[in-house]
C-alpha cells in the first residue's frame, strides 16, 4: 500500500542528508581520488600487456569509479542548493559567455573548447553563478562523446515575449565518420548532469527546456523568464 510521507518523515530525511553532507562532500571524494590513482598506477604497470584480462578489468573499474565520482558530485551540488540564497543581477550575456569558457576549461580540463555568443546582447537579470554552472553541467554530459577532440559551443540569445531564450549548439572536430551516440540506454534527460542543470536553473525560476543529442551535433535550450516573473 502506498503511503504519503508524513512531515516528520521528511524532517528525518532532511536531517540525515545534512549529516551525510560531510561524507559525500569531503570524505567520499577523497576515497575516490585514491582509488582512481591506484587504478591509474595499475594501468601503467608494465606487467600488464595491452591484451591482458587484467588491463580490461582495470578499465572497467576506472569506469565504475568515474560513475561513482559523478554521483558524488551530483549529491554534493544538490546539498549546496538546499541552503543557497539566489542572487539575481543584470548580466551581459557576452561577458557571461567568457566566464562560461573559463569554467569549462577548469572543470573539464581534458576537453578543448571554442566558445562564441551571438544574437541578443542586451543585459538580462539572472543568477549568473547558477546559470554558468547549469551550462557547464550540460556540456559535461554532451562532451563525454569526444573528450579529446575540439568542441565548439555556440550560444544564441533571443528575446521572446515572456523572457530570454538561450539556445546552445555543440559541435566537434571533424572525423572520418560521425561520432557515435553514447552506448548506454539511459535517456539523456535522466542523466545526472542534465538533472542537476535543471535544478540549478529551477532555484531562481529559469528552465532547461530541452537537451537533444544527435550524431553530428547536439543542442540545448534554456529559458530565463522576464525579471518580474522571477523576482
Image (cartoon, grey):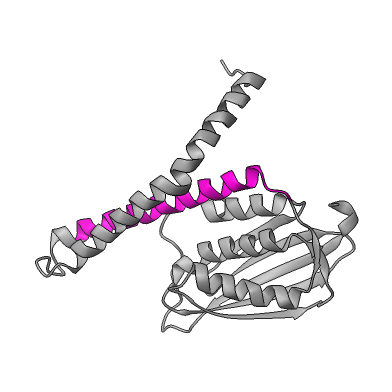
Res. 187 visible in picture: no
Q: Residue furthest top?
A: 1
Q: Nearer the viewer, residue 185 or 71?
A: 71
The residue segment tinted magenta is: 56-85
Can you give x and y, in whole percent of width and height, for residue 156 in the image? 73, 75
Residue that appears at 84% across and 75% down? 122
Q: Which of 168 and 68 is in front in this view?
A: 68
- The dominant secondary structure in magenta is helix
In the picture provided, is 229 more to the left or to the right than 104?
right
Q: Which of 116 and 171 is in front in this view?
A: 116
Q: Which residue lies furthest to the left in this view?
A: 47
Q: In which quarter of the image is the N terminus?
A: top right
Can you give x and y, in whole percent of width and height, for residue 91 in the image? 78, 70
Can you give x and y, in whole percent of width and height, for residue 189 in the image? 58, 53
Res. 228 visible in picture: yes
Residue that appears at 70% across and 57% down? 209
Indicate yes or no whether the magenta region holds residue 225.
no
Question: Is 155 rendered above or below residue 163?
Answer: below
Residue that appears at 67% across and 58% down? 130
Can you give x and y, in whole percent of width and height, for residue 31 in the image? 34, 49
Residue 128, image quadrant: bottom right
Q: How many marks?
A: 0
Amino acid at each position: 500500500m502506498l503511503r504519503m510521507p508524513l512531515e516528520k518523515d521528511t524532517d528525518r530525511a532532511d536531517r540525515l542528508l545534512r549529516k551525510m553532507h560531510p561524507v559525500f562532500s569531503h570524505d567520499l571524494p577523497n576515497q575516490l581520488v585514491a582509488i582512481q590513482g591506484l587504478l591509474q598506477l595499475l594501468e601503467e604497470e608494465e606487467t600488464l600487456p595491452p591484451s591482458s584480462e587484467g588491463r580490461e578489468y582495470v578499465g572497467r573499474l576506472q569506469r565504475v569509479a568515474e560513475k561513482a565520482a559523478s554521483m558524488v558530485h551530483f549529491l554534493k551540488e544538490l546539498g549546496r542548493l538546499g541552503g543557497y540564497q539566489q542572487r539575481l543581477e543584470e548580466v551581459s550575456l557576452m561577458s557571461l559567455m567568457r566566464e562560461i569558457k573559463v569554467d569549462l576549461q577548469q572543470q573539464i580540463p581534458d576537453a578543448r573548447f571554442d566558445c562564441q555568443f551571438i544574437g541578443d546582447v542586451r543585459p538580462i537579470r539572472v543568477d549568473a553563478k547558477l546559470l554558468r554552472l547549469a551550462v557547464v553541467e550540460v556540456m559535461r554530459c554532451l562532451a563525454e562523446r569526444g573528450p579529446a577532440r575540439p568542441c565548439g559551443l555556440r550560444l544564441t540569445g533571443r528575446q521572446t515575449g515572456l523572457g530570454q531564450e538561450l539556445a546552445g549548439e555543440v559541435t566537434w572536430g571533424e572525423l572520418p565518420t560521425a561520432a557515435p551516440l553514447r552506448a548506454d540506454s539511459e535517456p539523456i534527460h535522466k542523466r545526472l548532469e542534465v538533472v542537476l542543470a535543471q535544478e540549478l536553473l529551477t532555484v531562481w525560476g529559469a528552465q532547461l527546456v530541452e537537451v537533444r543529442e544527435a550524431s553530428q551535433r547536439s543542442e540545448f535550450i534554456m529559458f530565463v523568464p522576464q525579471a518580474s516573473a522571477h523576482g
